[in-house]
Image (cartoon, coloured by chain):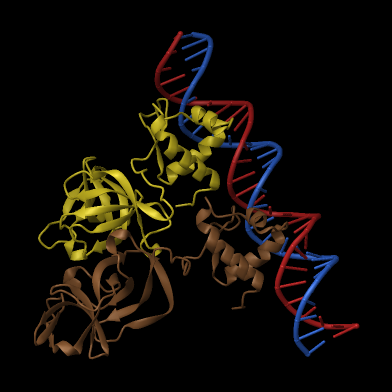
Chain colours: A brown, B yellow, C blue, D red
Amino acid sequence: MKALTRKQQDIYEFLLVNQKKLAYPPTLSELCLMLGLSSRGSLHKHIKALIEAGLVEPIDRKQTGIRLTEKAKEPLLDQDGGLPFVGRIAAGKPIEAIENVSYLAIPEQIKTKNPCYVLQVKGDSMIDEGIFDGDWVVIEQRSEARNGEIVVALIDKSEATLKFIEQYPHETLLIPANSSMAAMPFLPEQVEIQGVLVGQMRSYT
Amino acid sequence: MKALTRKQQDIYEFLLVNQKKLAYPPTLSELCLMLGLSSRGSLHKHIKALIEAGLVEPIDRKQTGIRLTEKAKEPLLDQDGGLPFVGRIAAGKPIEAIENVSYLAIPEQIKTKNPCYVLQVKGDSMIDEGIFDGDWVVIEQRSEARNGEIVVALIDKSEATLKFIEQYPHETLLIPANSSMAAMPFLPEQVEIQGVLVGQMRSYT
DNA sequence: AAACTTGTTCTTCTTTTGTTCTCTTGGTAT
DNA sequence: ATACCAAGAGAACAAAAGAAGAACAAGTTT
């Protein structure tokens, strides 16, 4: 895939920034006006490059009124109110970090005033709590939890997992929500709390 | 389903905005006046597209003076990316509408390009699918579904419910995801699909 | 009965869109 | 210098969107 030229990057950035302000996807002529160009033909060459790069797609059927829209993958440019999606968590492994951090828009109702981040769940250890493989969870960043809360726990500084927690003076229990799995006892110093579950989301598409 | 053209979007939006001001559903001629057109024939082509998209429906009574009305499901139009939270759904009752519609910021990943809205679930009929009492669900507004999808179904024009659907020529099954509940058989004409589940969210706070 | 009005279907026409082309300009590297 | 490439302008084209109007069947009104 060829690298984008400077002008193409500019146009792509323009689309990212202005997309939400537009009532509908812009036509080439309209984009020319906004960008100060006077030739659809010139612009089309750049758009074509963006399409080949997978950053933009025609809105519809072939030669219909063809318009542009951002690709299904719309990374970046959320930030305002969005939470960082930082990685995947699977029981028994460290959190698998994501290369490019993206930001998700999260409803106020399922986050807190404190800093939060988003993980994707791998595995079925919380299935009885309605947290399935592939679900996203919103985690409030803190290092302490009350008994009965669901936490992201780091075990022996190596394994991360999502479990109910029960803390007693000389023992910490990490309890899966899966009838086929048993609670796991640890010494308090083995378990480091990295956050507490405050929300969960799932996509069916 | 074909995508709407620009003009069709404009007309649909016009209907959404002006619907409440009109005493009766408008005729084609009246709409022409309001929209500044001078040909019923041209307008009719656009309206036909809206009907096929399920966004509008004839007021029926056979061949009487036929008029248009927005479909039962019209309530949306997101507000800068947010989806409208329109009510609660409990098996066995109509959707309980919310007095003041609020808008929730929803991550791109759990909504679709088509109009969506948000309901809060009451009851445990989908518990085996990880959809619990109090969860929010994101519903894509459409009137048809494939077998195996989870839909908002209106039964006998009176009860709304969230269930798996299986449609056969002479029977429509609504299937709960709860081992203690049985599938419910209906005649196809008893069941009207109001939307399809595309996402789910839960707050733990 | 005749005189509307309704939705619907056609055909015709203009405007706009995406696309491809050629030509020109300016900057950069060899 | 020559060669190369990004970039813009503008012409030309097929296809689509949009608009206008004529014509028709069926209903309601006068």
The residue at the point 19 percent across, 60 percent down is B126
Q: Nearer the viewer, residue A148 or B35?
A: A148
On screen, residue A63 versus residue B140, left or right, reads right
Using the image, determine if residue A31 lies above or below residue B98.
Answer: below
Q: Quadrant of residue B81?
A: bottom left
Using the image, determine if residue B200 lies above or below residue B101.
Answer: below
Name the spot of residue D11 as percent of width and height, x first. 81, 55
Residue B170 visible: no
Q: Nearer the viewer, residue B40 or A172?
A: A172
Q: Quadrant of residue D9?
A: bottom right
Name the spot of residue A37 as percent of width and height, x first. 70, 58
On screen, residue B62 versus residue A42, left or right, reads left
Quarter placement of the N terminus of chain A = bottom right
Name the spot of residue D30 as percent of width and height, x first. 46, 8
Name the spot of residue B143 as percent of width and height, x first. 34, 48
Total count of labels:
0
Residue A194 visible: yes
Q: Nearer the viewer, residue B179 or A67?
A: A67
Using the image, determine if residue B18 lies above or below residue A16.
Answer: above
On screen, residue D24 versus residue A202, left or right, reads right
Quarter placement of the C terminus of chain A = bottom left
